[in-house]
Amino acid sequence: MNDPVHVFIGVGSNVDRERHIRAGLDDLAREFGELKVSPVYESEAVGFNGSPFLNLVVSVHTDKSVAELSHCLKAIERDNGRKANARRFSPRTLDLDILTYGALDAPRDGVEIPREEILLNAFVLRPLADLAGDCRHPVDGRTYRELWQSYRSDQKLWPVDFRWP
């Protein structure tokens, strides 16, 4: 058995948002045990015209490989109504993305690691900076707090009062 790896997972929904986020967090907790959860933010849809999203980041430890973790997250998405053949830029009941997997700094098993959206999208970087501000991006090397402080984009997001569990 491998030593557990520290993983950050991006969580989002813009369809029946609170219900799907809560259900997704419940499923993640059943699968991985203790979750550390960032504050939740509302943001405009990026890449398509759609309802606003709720987004957050979750920290877990797992002994699953990248492929096993990806398969597990896709199963949780499907269990929460996500269609396997949905277009990339479309409404989502639940979106679970591996953002980082330990110090891994290159794609593995068909999964982009670290996920490019960390550096591109406020709805990923801001909650990651809130949750793990002192952790360092595996490629860039700066802390997530430093990355957020230097982030420049017109993407807007707003904190949301969200309680779980």
Image (cartoon, rainbow, N blue to C red):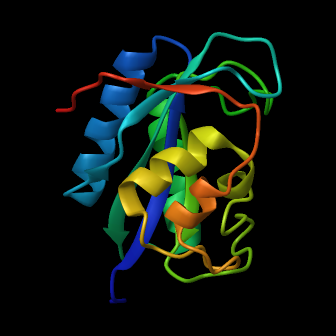
| As drawn, 144 above or below 126 | below
Q: Residue 67, percent across and down? A: 59, 68
Residue located 51% across and 66% down the image: 68
Q: Please, is residue 158 above or below residue 60 in the view? A: above
Q: Is residue 132 above or below residue 29?
A: below
Residue situated furthest front in the rendering: 149
Asked if residue 54 can be seen in this view, the reply is yes
Q: What residue is at 39 percent from the left and 74 percent from the top?
A: 6
Residue 72 place in picture, x, y as percent: 47, 53
Q: Quadrant of residue 66?
A: bottom right
Q: Residue at x 69, y 43 (%)?
A: 121
Which of the pair 135/31 is nearer the observer?
135
User: Which residue sits at x=62%, y=62%?
Assistant: 147
Which quadrant is home to the N terminus? bottom left
Q: How many marks?
A: 0
In front of the other: 120 or 73 = 120
Q: Quadrant of residue 99?
A: bottom right
Query: Which residue is nearer to you in this view: 140 or 18?
Result: 140
Q: Position of residue 17 (x, y in %)?
A: 45, 17
Please state which of residues 129 and 139 is positioned toward the viewer in this rendering.
Answer: 129
Answer left or right for 153 relative to 62: right
Q: Mark yes or no: residue 72 visible.
A: no
Residue 116 at x, y percent in the picture? 74, 58
Quadrant in the picture for the C terminus: top left
Residue 99 left/right relative to 117:
left
